[in-house]
Image: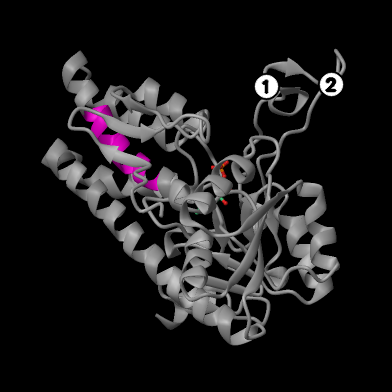
Amino acid sequence: MTDDVRTVEWAGDGLRLLDQTVLPGRVEHVVARDVGGLVDAIRRLVVRGAPALGVAGAFGVAVAMLQAEREGWDGAARDAAIARIREARPTAVNLAAGVDRAVPLVAKGVDAVVAAAQALLDEDVRGNRAIGASGADWIAARTPDRPLRVLTHCNAGALATAGWGTALGVVRELHDRGRVEKVYVDETRPLLQGARLTAWELERAGVPYLVQADGAAPSTILRGLVDVAVIGADRIAANGDTANKIGSVGVALACAAAGVPLVVAAPWSTVDLALPSGDGIPIEERPAGEVLAWGGVRTAPDGAAAFNPAFDVTPARLVTALVTETGVLEVAAGATPAHAAALR
Ligand code: MRU
């Protein structure tokens, strides 16, 4: 089981992060004690996944406060450093939301900020358990009564959150109920969050899985080998348009063509009601070297340039269900986050 995985943990004088860049080969931690180190860790995906970034952002405010004290910064320098953390990666709304949750407590001191960040961490784990239970209920009620063939993309597990996971939390709950035959794990080019991280988590949890190339996913779905696809999200617009790891749209299109449900599992904090549609979601573009080289060895010819968007946006009409800790919205059928918010 992966319950022992602690992606983000307050270490008293800094933020202890499980270094996801070296998994599955090595289990190592880094401690970010200054803002430069934390921003670098976020950009290099030492810590990654929308909910984990939110928690890291909240603790990051405490990191900035401690550094400001140590180095004699004024309030403006401290606030500029906090803004650097908030903007370290643009797509997952949770990072900015995590920072924004901690900032009002700055005047109360470091301990108050750490307590707020820890509360966010605890809420995330609780929310993921609720997402897992209602996602598994929804899927079980709409799929054949036998162990299911599930497909997932990227990593939306314990490693991407404060614990348990969102999409993988649903998979783990289904597995605990004896309802998983196997999981098709998209390798998730170019940084292999599927092959490295999701496979590592499923291996430890004893869930049967197969890693496949991203390009195999649409065909696996169209061949009738998948009962349900479950993915996470980095930002969900008010109309249900959903940003997630690049390659998610291909999965969604194939699911729609094959009549396979596409389930997006995410905490409500990933919903950005300020954006009417996915057109406004900022899509991170990452360094060319991630696609032009492999393991430090150039694979593309000298002179090749790259287009490396880290995320794509799946239109709401392709999202069968959005599972949050507050329940399930059948988005393609018209139940959008905006409707749900209006009913609250
Ligand atoms: O670039 P990453 O690894 O941070 O991308 C992560 C994803 O796309 C996840 O699917 C998403 O953040 C949901 S995590 C519960």
Circle 1 packing at 10 Å, graded few (<14), some (14-19), many (20+), is: few
Residue 175 seen in the current view: yes
Q: In the image, residue 52 lies at what x, y percent?
A: 41, 46
- 340 and 312: which one is in front? 312
Q: In the image, residue 265 lies at what x, y percent?
A: 53, 65
Give the residue type at disc 2: Ala
Please report the residue visible at 76 percent of the width from the left and 48 percent of the height from the top.
214
Helix, strand or loop at mark 1: loop
- 25 and 233: which one is in front? 25
Who comes first in sequence, dot 2 or dot 1?
1
Query: Are the residues tagged 2 and 1 within 8 Å (C-beta)?
Result: no
Q: CA distance from mark 2 to mark 1?
A: 13 Å
Which mark, residue 300?
Answer: 2
Please report the residue visible at 50 percent of the width from the left and 67 percent of the height from the top.
170
Q: Quadrant of residue 250?
A: bottom right
Mark 1 sits on what residue?
295
Question: Quick one: quadrant of the C terminus?
Answer: bottom left
Q: Main secondary structure of the magenta part?
A: helix
Give the residue type at disc 1: Gly
Q: Is residue 68 left or right of residue 229?
A: left
Region rendered in magenta: 54-65
Assess whether residue 63 is covered by the magenta stretch: yes
Q: In the image, residue 124 lies at what x, y percent?
A: 35, 58
